[in-house]
Amino acid sequence: NGGVGAAMITGYRQALELGADVVVKMDGDDQMNPKHLLPLLDPILAGEADYTKGSRFFHTRQLRQMPFVRRAGNLGLSFLTKASSGYWDVFDPTNGYTAIHRRVLEVLDWNNIDRRWFFETSMLIELNLARAVVRDVQIPAKYGDERSSLSAASALVRFPRRLLGAFFRRLWLQYFVRDFSPVSLFLVSGTLLSLFGTIWGLAHWVRSSQTGIEASTGTVMVAVVPLILGVQLLLQAVSLDIQNTPKVPFSRSSARRVVGD
């Protein structure tokens, strides 16, 4: 009873021992139709992706079957997961209908993958750090009278906090530990400038409110200019991070094949 993540890690390891080339996760809640299995496998078998996952947000008619609370939660969670995982082009992160190539499984850091309900999201984060290519596959939503055992209120409290921590961890590892790129420079300079402008502006605003003396134009500009530049640099860092989404699958990279084999 270690949780859904612990169960999946056990299954993945067993599949590797059995020599599986591709491992598929299909939940037993009758929401995942086996007829969508082949479209899920196609990008991996064609060497276009390392990990594929279903997305229920392509089919608007079937999407209406999803309970509104779950739909709204998935939309918000999807945006937060894009930032924390670095996969800005994927959606529906909690979708559990997935397929993965063994070469990716062999290089993942299992110690950093959540053992419980955060499993699918933490899996995406570790996949990005391994530079695996992830592809969404259109799979319509299917809901009956079943009820999820995951509390929406609990997820609303726990998931954003964990996603924020995962976001900073990914930035640190990807842009400061493993590499130093223009994104690293923009993040540092943009953060420092934004903090300086914010702190300077707040300090003089508090002083003006206490003394009743308006701040001079120069004082205001000292706060505004660094703040504007800092925000622009941070936006540029986000833009470059979006462009840095992994694009070369393991199966097409000779260096990665050596690691995988």
Image (cartoon, grey):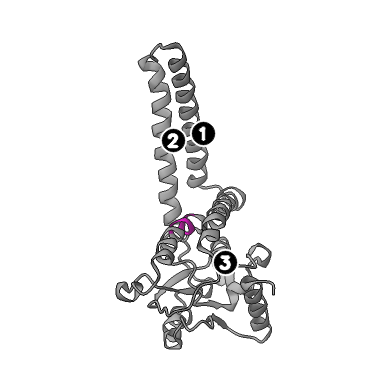
Kind of residue indicated by mark 3: Met
As drawn, the residue found furthest toward the left would be 61
Residue 6: % across, % down: 66, 72
Residue 121: % across, % down: 54, 64
Q: Which residue is mark 2?
A: 230
Kind of residue indicated by mark 1: Leu
Q: Is residue 158 above or below residue 4?
A: above
Total marks in image: 3
Q: Is residue 216 above or below residue 239?
A: above
Q: Who comes first in sequence, dot 3 or dot 2?
A: 3
Q: Who comes first in sequence, dot 3 or dot 1?
A: 3
Kind of residue indicated by mark 2: Gly
Q: Is residue 128 above or below residue 201?
A: below
Which residue range is magenta in the image? 79-83
Q: Which residue is mark 1?
A: 192
Observer-nearest of 138 and 170: 138
